[in-house]
Image: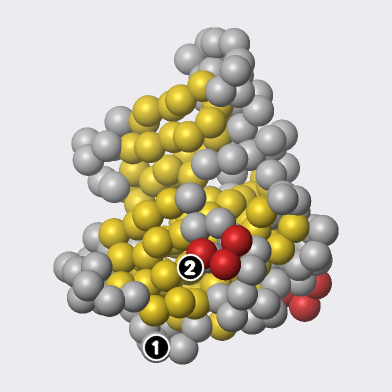
Amino acid sequence: MNFRFDPHRAGHAVLLAMDAGKCWESKDGLKTWVFHGHEPWPWGGGNDATFAGDTVYATTGQFGGNASILRTTDGQAWVTLAGKAHGLPPFQGGGEAKRIYALPDDPKSVWAVVRERLYHSTDGGEHWKVVHRGPGLAWIAADPKQPRRFYVSGAKNVYRTEDGAKFTPIGGPHVAGRIACDSPGRLYVAAWRGQRAGL
C-alpha cells in the first residue's frame, strides 16, 4: 500500500501492506525487517507512515474497518491506538485510518485522515479530535520548506493549512486523490475520475 523512507535516519524505512502485511520496519537499509501491529490482531492492513524525530506513526485499516494508529516513541516498543478511548472510531466497522502527518520538530502534533475526516492529536496520539470534515478527505502532503504548511485532498477541493487548525479550500480537480509536494514546496495533485475545478 505504501513505503516510506525516514528523511532523518539513513537506512530506516517502513513498509505498509494489506491484510497481515500491515506494518514492517527496517533499520538496516532494508536487509532485515520487524513486524508491528500485533494488537488488537495482526490483520487489518497498513496504509501510511510518518517520521518525526524518534517517533514513528503508521495507520491501519481496510475494507471499511480496522482503523488504528500505530506509534513508537523510542524506536523499540510500538503501541496500537484505536477506538473511543482515544477519540477514534471503533476498530471494527469504524472506517479506515489512511494518511498521517506529524510535525518534524513537534512529534506530539499529528494529523490523520480517518473515515475520510481529518483528526488531530496534540499529545502524541493518545487523544484525537476531528478538525476538518471534508467531504471525502484522502491524502496529506506537507511543504518540506515550511512543515507547518500542509495540504489535504478531498472530494470537492484541495485544502491548505498554515497551522493545522484552519483549512482554506484552494480548488483543484474533482475528485482530488493522491497529492505530493516536491522539494521547493510545489504541490502536485492527481485527479481520480473527476472533473477539473478552478485552481
Image-based side of 19 in relation to 33, left or right: right
Q: In the rendering, at what x and y percent does residue 149 appear?
A: 41, 45
Foreground: 61 or 104? 61
Dots 2, 1 in contact, CB < 8 A: no
From this view, report whether residue 5 is shown above or below residue 31: above
From this view, report whether residue 86 is shown above or below residue 142: below
Label 1 residue SS: loop
Foreground: 191 or 153? 191
Foreground: 48 or 1? 1
Q: Residues within 10 Å of mark 1 (few under 14, many from 20)?
A: few
Q: In the rendering, at what x and y percent does residue 30 appear?
A: 24, 68
Identify the residue at horizontal 65%, vertical 58% (top origin): 61
Label 2 residue SS: strand
Question: Within the image, what quadrant is residue 27 found in?
Answer: bottom left
Identify the residue at horizontal 27%, vertical 37% (top origin): 182
Q: Earlier in the sequence, mark 2 or mark 1?
A: 2
* Label at residue 2: none
Identify the residue at horizontal 19%, vertical 69% (top origin): 29
Between the C-alphas of marks 2 and 1, the distance is: 14 Å
Identify the residue at horizontal 29%, vertical 47% (top origin): 144
User: Hey, what amino acid is under mark 1?
Assistant: Gln
From this view, report whether residue 117 is shown above or below residue 19: above
Q: According to the image, label 1 marks what residue?
A: 76
What is the tally of numbered marks visible in this picture? 2
Q: According to the image, label 2 marks what residue?
A: 23
